[in-house]
Image: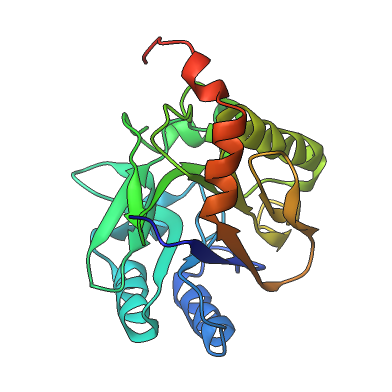
Amino acid sequence: MASPTLTLGLVQVDIIWENPEENIRRMEQLLKDASPADVLLLPEMWTTGFTMQPERFAETHPGPALMWMQSTAQQKNIAITGSMAVSDDNRFVNRWYCAFPNGQIAHYDKKHLFSYGDENNHYTPGDSTIIIEINGWRIMPLICYDLRFPAWGRNRDNYDLLIIAANWPTPRIHHWDALIKARAIENQSYVAAVNRIGTDGTGLQYTGHSQVIDMNGQALCAPYTTEGIQYVTLDMESLTTFRQKFPFLKDMDTFSL
């Protein structure tokens, strides 16, 4: 049975370009005085920024950043999520991890690689989605560009929360805002999306706009642009009541990928 509430901490940060060691140190400082929560959400490629040099900066599995996530999750009794460039089985992947407080991990490899940014020429796409559980809440992760492809993240009545880790640049931030709300409404789900701020090594600027939207398309955490952790508590009864009142998911198409 799911816990009545789930508290999220959205960690919006200015990622230091291609410097995993310094990003781990900065994250340690940022989380030093973190408030109690159930899950911390870190952005896409939080150790490097959106690098296209995985041969130089990808960590092996398991590497130092993942081990830091595991140890911090255990010390703080909190689940920690986020993606990074990973070298695994002679390939590079953009891999989202969840480190659980009990030391276990789950992972998802980004399916839709951002060809406009040449990601498809440096990384191997994943081929399956995952659903994890935290305190009984069913959660699906997506990574950045996945957000544009609704069939991939379709709620088949198997998740309560969709989380998105991203490096989504300022020129298309209005797409980000619109797509997050659309995913929440069409899937009758909470959506928690965390983005970075600052400027990366290629000159791209990032405005952040990390946010949490409920199943009715309403903001529980409005898009914000500063570095730091924003906390939001989700309510399971509100979600269940809304789905019972508007049982749209039962009318979904039955196609499969």
Q: Is residue 117 visible?
A: no
Q: Which one is nearer the viewer's eye here, 26 or 40?
A: 40
Q: Residue at x 41, y 59 (%)?
A: 57
Quarter placement of the C terminus: top left
Tally of numbered discs:
0
Quadrant location of residue 70?
Answer: bottom left
What percent of the width, then of the height, locates residue 113?
A: 48, 32
Instruction: Give the residue furthest to the left.
Output: 89
Corner quadrant of residue 69? bottom left
- Does residue 224 sit above or below 74 in this rendering? above
Q: Position of residue 150 (x, y in %)?
A: 55, 24
Identify the residue shown where x is 31% and y is 50%: 107
Check the picture and name the quadrant holding the N terminus.
Answer: bottom left
Image coloring type:
rainbow
Q: Nearer the viewer, residue 89 or 127?
A: 127
- Closest to the observer, 52 or 213: 213
Query: Does any portion of residue 129 appear in the rendered image?
Result: yes
Which residue shows up at 24% across the image and 73% down it?
Answer: 102
**Up/down of 140 relative to 125, above or below:** below
226 left or right, relative to 65? right
What is the x, y in percent for residue 74? 31, 80
On screen, residue 61 versus residue 220, left or right, reads left
55 to 39, vertically: above or below: above
